[in-house]
Image (cartoon, helix red, strand yellow):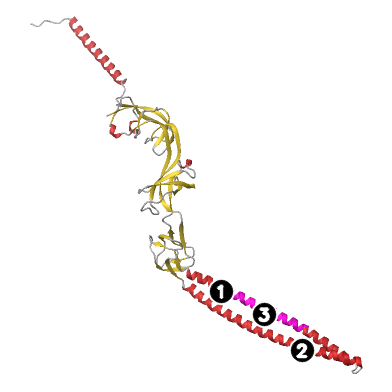
Amino acid sequence: MDVPRGKSTARKKRVRIVLYAVVAIIAVTAITLGVSRMKPAAPSVERSTTLIDTVKRGQMLRQVRGMGTLVPQDIRVIAAATQGRVERVLVQPGTEVTAGTVLIELSNPELQQGTVDIEYQLRAAEADYNNIRARLESERMSQQAAAATVQSEYQQAKLQSDTDEQLAKDGLIPAINLKLSRVRVADLANRYSIEQKRLQGTSKSAQAQLASQAARINQLKAQLELRRTQVATLRVLAGTNGVLQQMQVEVGQQVQPGTNLARVVEPQNLKAELRIAETQAKDITLGQQASVDTRNGIIPGHVVRIDPASQNSTVTIDVALDAPLPQGARPDLSVDGTIELERLDNILYVARPAFGQSQSSVGMFKLEPGGQFATRVQVKLGRSSVNTIEVLEGLQEGDQVILSDTSQWDAFNRIRLN
């Protein structure tokens, strides 16, 4: 038979349920609080995927590096000296040439016809010169003959005057005859003086006319020489020994004076033109040592020119080569250049990280003893080189740090290396 439960039993059951609920709530709260206060687990990183280097103390060589090309030191740009049409291109780029090698033949019919016209004008001027000289010579001789006639008459009159003087003394002729003789002598003496002056004037006039015609001849000769020189330049010469690097015209093209036709270079005399980032070029000075990698050998050199202007955030640096070029080196060959800035003694340095710049502070992961974990530390960096960078604060000699890009772990201060 059923036994009825008492009120005390029901009350005890409710109390137990409440106690169980309170205990459960307290347990959940404690667990939640404990979990919230736990540090996140360190992410795992494969050691083989990271680049690790050891901090060292000693001498660090500061260098800057840039890409560039080999360019000739001596470039002869051949320009058209006169207007013309390209008839023939005789040499192609890459061919060795000498100073007398004909590269291009031009044509200019007007220039050639003008040269012929000046030649005929010169011949006519020379014929006129000879004609004027013969005519002036004839006039001079006629003037000399006239002067000689007057001189002869003067001398005869002088003799007659002397005779009349003697006869007048003896009273053999009237005084009037003596006076007439004296007048005739004075008249002929005056005429003879005039003829002498006319002869001198004729000579000066002849010299002036001949000089004028000679100047005309010299002018035509100069014009003819200029035209012949222009005609000669229709055969375009290399002008120097070397290699034809570039041909800039084609057959049938019309060119004007000053048009660039070709470029000839001396392939033995090359220099390196390096393009250095403008932020790194500030420490470069003339004379600094450099090395140029041609992919077929490394050639020592030194800085000989620094471009005063920056283009596309780079500065052009010219490096003269101090050793013979390797086999296969040629103009426009791509090269890598490294310039030595300075040697820093007794400094703390490490290999350059992927994310650090000079004169900056960065967070780097330093390996803990044992090498299983790495902790983030703040590192102050100083002067940098191509492959190394100075450490000012945050690391000690012998510390090992991760140099790879660690941006994916910016949310963690500690990582595990597997």
Span highlighted in magenta in the image: 193-217
| Amino acid type of the residue that numbered disc 2 sits on in the rendered structure | Ser
Note whether 357 is above or below 337 in the view shown: above
In the rendered structure, does residue 388 fall within the stretch colored magenta? Answer: no
**Left or right: where 124 falls relative to 382:** right
Q: Relative to the observer, which residue lies in front, 64 or 417?
A: 64
Q: Secondary structure at mark 1?
A: helix
| Residue that numbered label 2 is attached to | 152
C-alpha span from label 3 to label 1: 22 Å
Q: Are marks 3 and 1 in contact (CB under 8 Å)?
A: no
| Amino acid type of the residue that numbered disc 3 sits on in the rendered structure | Ala
Residue 409 x/y as whole percent: 33, 31
Residue 101 x/y as whole percent: 42, 65
| Residue that numbered label 3 is attached to | 206
Give neighbour class at mark 2: few <14, some 14-19, many 20+ (Cα, 10 Å). some
Q: Mark 2 or mark 1, which is nearer to you?
A: 2
| Residue that numbered label 1 is attached to | 221
**Left or right: where 221 falls relative to 232:** right
Residue at the spot 73% in from the left edge and 87% down from the top edge:
146
Residue at the spot 51% in from the left edge and 76% down from the top edge:
116
Give neighbour class at mark 1: few <14, some 14-19, many 20+ (Cα, 10 Å). some
